[in-house]
Amino acid sequence: MLVGAASLPSAPLLITDVGRGLGLSAQQLRASVRRLARSLPVADVLVLVAAGHPALHDTVTADMAGLGYPNVRRNLDPCPAAITALSRLTQYPRVRRPRLPLDLGSLALLIDRSEPVVALEVSATAEYPVLSAVGASVVTALGDAGLQGNIVAAGDLSAGLHDGAPLAAIPGAPEWDARMVELHSRGRPKELGELGPAEAARVGAHGWAPLCVLQGASACAGMTLTVRRYSAPRGAGYLMVSARRPAD
């Protein structure tokens, strides 16, 4: 069963040994990430979700060598039972690579937990119903494998909120972020489909697809996501939400 759910930034700058000399807002965001990661329930497996090419990773090595930090590295254990069950349900291929893609690797390093991992990539161009169904499949796969799990999705919103942002200023980006926060704050995440995938790509929000998966998983498990923080250091928006399974 699913016992906890959350979204966190997948920004490498928030990793302690990568981002140095951060401003106050980024430092506060980093602290919030740590608190939320620690608050997830004890579980058998951790499911990480980021956008990319649909795949399940049989090897879980997270490192920042591609950014010039080869010593920032962790080798995590995969969870074969959950990976097998989820691959059967989604028909996603299983891949073995020297390292996780950047977003998944950053999530693994930021969360810094010891549970075996299911590293899941989903398509950024898929529609909301497809992504939500993948989330529901995560819950089913955990049940099929007889495991309790947490799911954590990349919550990166627009990277173009003003002229100093990574993508410079993108028209409508602040409004897009505001709408994402509003939908989660008002308990209406099913309307996420109105904001992507094309519009999410236009504003540089690569967390839209993972957040759709998170919503599908949470709804299937009967959990309601709550906004914990929205922050936009350096012109890039990050949404943090979480939920726990109610006690029996």
Image (cartoon, helix red, strand yellow):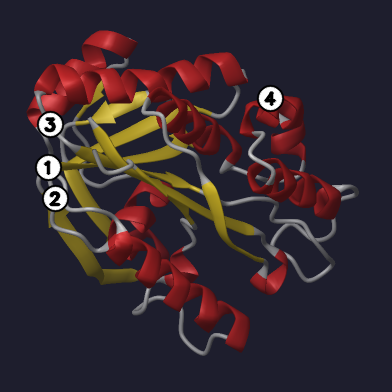
In this rendering, which labeled residue sits more in front, label 4 or label 3?
A: 3
Q: Say what secondary structure mark 4 lies in.
A: helix
Marks 2 and 3 in Cβ contact (< 8 Å): no
Distance from Cα at disc 1 to Cα at disc 4: 31 Å
Marks 2 and 1 in Cβ contact (< 8 Å): yes
Q: Is residue 158 found left or right of 103 in the rendered image? A: right
Mark 4: amino acid = Gly
Few, some or many residues within 10 Å of mark 2 (<14, 14–19, 20+): some
Name the spot of residue 17 as percent of width and height, x first.
34, 79
Name the spot of residue 57 as percent of width and height, x first.
23, 33
User: Which residue is identified by label 2?
Assistant: 115
Residue 193 badge: 4
User: Which residue is identified by label 3?
Assistant: 147
- Residue at figure coordinates x 53%, y 38% from the top left: 211
User: Which residue is identified by label 1?
Assistant: 44
Name the spot of residue 147 as percent of width and height, x first.
12, 31
Among numbered discs 2 and 4, the one appearing first in the sequence: 2
